[in-house]
Amino acid sequence: MNGPLGEITTVAGRNSFDVAAVRRDFPILSILVHGKPLVFLDNGASAQKPEAVLQAMDTMYRTSYANVHRGIYALSDAATGMYEAARETVRRFLGAADASEIVFTSGGTDSLNLVARCWGQSFLKPGDEVLVCESEHHSNIVPWQLAAAATGAVVRPIPVTDAGVFDFDAFTAMLSPKVKAVAVAHMSNVLGTIMPIKRIAAAAHAAGAIVVADGCQGAVHQTVDVQDLDVDFYAITGHKIYGPTGIGALYGKRALLDALPPYKGGGDMIETVSFERSTWAEPPARFEAGTPMIVEAIGLAAAIDYIEGLGLARIHAHEAEVLAHATDLLGRIPGVRIVGTAPDKGGVLSFVAEGAHPADIATLLDQRGIAVRAGHHCAQPLMVRMGVSATTRASFALYNTLAEAEALASGVERALAMLR
């Protein structure tokens, strides 16, 4: 490959994935930034949207929009069918046993807050412990701190190694009858580490604890089967899976959802209402108060259909190839240290460089049209653990190319030459 963006090479010789064709499905990838072709490497924060998603949402607004569940007229009936079909798409995507185990939320953060509020404040008591991996995003730390403050429980961190690997021996040593819940991301948004969720769940269940998995990154970069993993709750967010913002989903085992009180009050989550008392609808309606994210759910389903149509295994193989190429190139740059070196990690590459602040590197990369993220990535405890205040993070998606990995490395070299 010649030049940083001289060719958008089809990475098809090894994994039969036509990235050039895929890129044509994403309108935004054709724009220029500061007069340069956009190289979008901030997918861990939010991914771009394919034409299929944009069209599905536009068509819904233009031809099929009405409020769901309450109407007895044709348009509402059609909208309800599409909304519930979207729930079935998410069920299939996550491998849940039944669509009633899929709750639509406003995103991954909302999903995790729902669990911490409804389950945590119902079942935790003083002296109970919640084990939370120290590499977690704040959205899987702070809700548990709030639940602990309300119940008298304690939040304890599960350590990761210097390479960013989940310390399973330390974890099992922490398990005791006091531990009621274990919260861990399927994949770290900073390290790219894919955590051994199935093994974690088996150990936690043997100790009598539930497992709450943040799948906002994990569901993007690997195939998920919640029944095989045997997690109790699994949270995803739409905008990282090439879908719209404002929509996510929470998988919960039906028996657990049945045992939980509502998250919010309002229409559609009730069975009966009087001024004396109210009774609650069955899950998932119990947790979906008010008018839901109707069009966003249709967009999420379209995004899932799109990536499943490309083939999840082919996508993941392509992303692994781009990640490996970028890791190799950045690893050759003097003074650059990659943060998170677990084997078989997902498409996230965080790094620091001697003599340069991550924000300055990101700013100079932006001048070359390269979008990366700099900061603590909503994982401040992990930054402390890894001995850094911030990192520059490149996160890869199905439309990124080997040429873009080379553009990243070239841009970092040029930035460091200016900053040092």
Image (tube, helix red, strand yellow):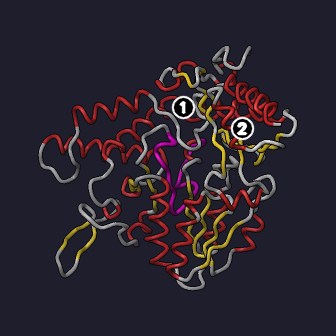
Measure the C-alpha gap from mark 1 to mark 2: 34 Å
Badge 2: residue crowd in 10 Å (few <14, some 14–19, many ≥20): many
- Which amino acid lies under the numbered mark 2 shown in the image of this protein? Ile
Q: Position of residue 38 (x, y in %)?
A: 58, 25
The numbered dot on residue 311 is: 1
Farthest-out residue, right? 334
> From which residue to which does the magenta span run?
221-241
Q: Position of residue 211 (x, y in %)?
A: 57, 65
Q: Position of residue 255 (x, y in %)?
A: 42, 68
Residue beneath disc 2: 361
Tag 1 and tag 2, C-beta contact below 8 Å: no
Which residue is drawn at the image coordinates 21% and 48% (left, top)?
A: 67
Identify the image quadrant of residue 159: bottom right
Q: Position of residue 348 (x, y in %)?
A: 67, 42
Q: Is residue 175 visible?
A: yes
User: For numbered disc 2, what is the local secondary structure?
Assistant: helix
Indicate which label's residue lies in the foreground, 1 or 2: 2
- Is 113 on the left or on the right of 414, as rendered? left
Q: Nearer the viewer, residue 163 or 256?
A: 163
- Is 147 on the left or on the right of 374, as rendered? left
- Is 217 on the left or on the right of 252, as rendered? right
Which residue is drawn at the image coordinates 35% and 59% (left, top)?
A: 284
Quadrant location of the N terminus in the rendered image: top right
**222 falls in the magenta region:** yes
